[in-house]
Image (tube, grey):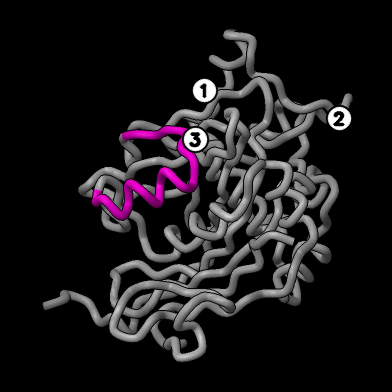
Amino acid sequence: MNDYDPEQVQIRPAATVMLIDDRPDLQLFMMERHAKTVFAGGMWVFPGGAVDAMDDSSEFQAISIHRSDTEASQLMGLESGGLAYYVAAFREAFEEAGILLALQKNTLQPLDLSDPLIEKRFQQHRDDINDSNRNFIEIIKDEGLIMDAGEMHYIARWITPSGPPRRFDARFFIARMPGNQTPIHDDGELVHSKWISPREILRKEEAGEMILMSPTLRMVKNLAHFDSASQVIESAAANQPDHRARVLAGTKVIVMPGEEGYEAGETDVENGWVRLRPL
């Protein structure tokens, strides 16, 4: 018996970012959540979380480049507020994985954390954010940075089905791992992390060695159709039309157009729209 009414659970806006790189084959940065976390405990996930009120601050529009709120909103079919999802994805990538997709404001060069002293300073920034001692926008401004929204590509939307105690309307993004930075999980809610190829993830999931939420697994399946990070980014930047996800009757298997069983698939189990696929 649930101690809450599933129909009354608030659906919160959220953002998730898939970090990819060629190492040397196409690989994806995955993190394992602590088994005792309320949402997705023990599962392998991408960096992500809820959109905070601060993420929608007009101040962020002045310190982001290559994508305005109007452009971000149009990409996601929103009237306004689209940039907040990008900001949340930037922030969560930093909080959970230690990766900051930003440029130096005065040179427009990518942030370089290869210097141990600079890396240590930004690790302190990360700790301060996670401990609620400072907010993300303060650090971006104090460090003279701007968020490179052009390097973050919107690729999917998934709405958590009714049932769990937490529900999200999550926008999925994808970005290439910046040079001179090293991702690492926060060692709090997240207990393990690693680079791994999409095909190896699918093999491990099939063998019961990795547990993924259905939308996460579906995104990995879509990514497995690519051979390199450059191919992925080219496809994501093309902003292809959404494909509506369906579920094979009597299963939890999510299928996309062109896959076996799609035409008879159910549309009231998982609400997902995906535009990541080969050109």
- The residue where tag 3 is placed is 97
Residue 123 shows which numbered tag?
1
**Residue 12 drawn at (x, y percent):** 48, 68
| 144 or 13, nearer to the observer | 13
- Residue displayed at 83% across by 45% down: 65
Q: Is residue 82 above or below residue 134?
A: below
Q: Element at badge 2?
A: loop
Magenta residues, as a range?
Answer: 192-208
Specify the quadrant that holds the C terminus: bottom right
- The residue where tag 2 is placed is 108
Q: Is residue 205 left or right of residue 58?
A: left
Specify the quadrant that holds the N terminus: bottom left
Q: Quadrant of the rendered structure where residue 51 is?
A: bottom right
In the displayed image of the protein, which residue is found farthest to the right? 107
Q: Is residue 143 above or below residue 238?
A: above
Q: Are marks 1 and 2 in contact (CB under 8 Å)?
A: no
Q: Earlier in the sequence, mark 1 or mark 2?
A: 2
